[in-house]
Amino acid sequence: MYYRRAPMPLPKALRRLTPERLRDDVRLRAVAVGGGLIPPRTMHSPREAALLREVARGRRRVVEIGVYEGSSAVVLCEVLGPAAELHLVDPFGPHAMALPAGWGATEHASRRVVARAVRRHGGPRVHWHIAFSADVARAWQGSVDLVFIDGDHSEEGCATDWELWHPLVEPGGCVLFHDARASQPGGTGLPGPTAVADRLFRGPGALPGWTIAGEADGAVAVVCKA
């Protein structure tokens, strides 16, 4: 059987010499990321990646909202087995409340990144949803056992993702919020997701039936107890 050799990424020292305007150019990044010349831009810290692996291990039906270049999806591919489903939700293109100004990704390049990770780790089954997360949630059939919310970072957008997706999470399932710990000592994040996580899960008004199961840098994992 013939296996195509994986592309060799450019040396990190050479990548550092690239001017910022070229590093952030969406079309050039699509060619380089899709071709494996550079890795997808990492959007999580090592501690956040460890928490993502922890909450994803053994899950059967996982939804990631906000894929960008696929770095978090690669982490999920490391721990999800070949029988698991990974649903990746992203409309792609520029979105002011999801990415810094000028950043963007292309569907084609991100698909290639994830496909390489699936081949390398032997799973899971990947389903792409090139759409806004609210539209996907409203049409969803069945339950899920992990939702990773990392799309629209406005308070309204993050709250909408929670309201639409959390009823689909089965008992023992998990929702992981990214960029949601700006209010905590040593935490990182953004105002929108932080406000949602604080309102729902901290203090005397914390939502019953859900509990914080793990935190790392900007990530907050909550588990459904009901």
Image: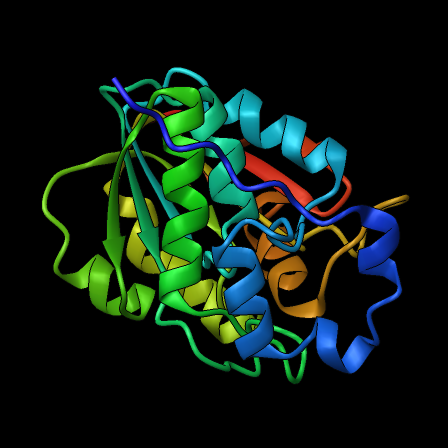
212 versus 150 height, above or below? above
Camera-nearest residue between 224 and 42: 42
Quarter holding residue 193: bottom right
Say which residue appears at 73% left-offset and 71% top-offset.
Answer: 23
Percent position of residue 5, x then y: 46, 32
Percent position of residue 129, x then y: 25, 59
Say which residue appears at 90% left-offset and 44% top-offset.
Answer: 186
Quarter holding residue 83: top left
Camera-nearest residue between 31 and 139: 31
Percent position of residue 215, x then y: 69, 34
Percent position of residue 123, x then y: 32, 24
100 versus 63 height, above or below? below
Instruction: State the colouring used for the structure image.
Output: rainbow
Say which residue appears at 63% left-offset and 68% top-offset.
Answer: 192
Work out whether residue 213 can be spotted: no
69 versus 84 height, above or below? below
Say which residue appears at 50% left-offset and 50% top-offset.
Answer: 70
| Side of 45 relative to 51 (left or right) | right
Image quarter in which the C terminus is found: top left
Q: How many marks?
A: 0
| Side of 20 relative to 134 (left or right) | right
Image quarter in which the N terminus is found: top left
Work out whether residue 159 can be spotted: yes
| Side of 18 relative to 4 (left or right) | right
Camera-nearest residue between 68 and 155: 68
Residue at the extreme front = 2
| Side of 81 relative to 36 (left or right) | left
